[in-house]
Image (cartoon, rainbow, N blue to C red):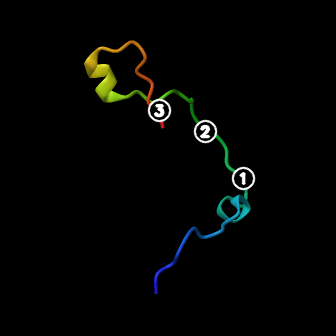
Amino acid sequence: MAIQGAIPLGQDLVFPHGAFVVGEVEAVQDFDRKQAGEVDIQSRD
């Protein structure tokens, strides 16, 4: 029997003590754009 759809989970169940950033946050670079020589190499969704 397969699950049809998403499983409802609250963030408090996944991270009961909260979620924190431990290191520096930086933009992800798109390798293909960088190799093509584009100016804006930030990865997009």
Viewer-proximal residue, 38 or 22? Answer: 38
Vertical placement of residue 16 versus 41, above or below:
below
Left or right of 38 on screen, residue 17: right
Residue 29, image quadrant = top left
Specify the label residue 35 is tagged with. none
Q: Earlier in the sequence, mark 3 or mark 1?
A: 1
**From the viewer's perspective, is the residue at label 3 or at label 1 nearer?**
3
* Residue 11 spot, x, y in % from top left: 70, 58
Amino acid type assigned to the residue bearing label 1 in the image:
Gly
Q: Residues within 10 Å of mark 1 (few under 14, many from 20)?
A: few
Specify the label residue 22 is tagged with. 2
Amino acid type assigned to the residue bearing label 3 in the image:
Arg
Q: Earlier in the sequence, mark 3 or mark 2?
A: 2
* Residue 45 spot, x, y in % from top left: 48, 38
Specify the label residue 18 is tagged with. 1
* Residue 39 spot, x, y in % from top left: 39, 12
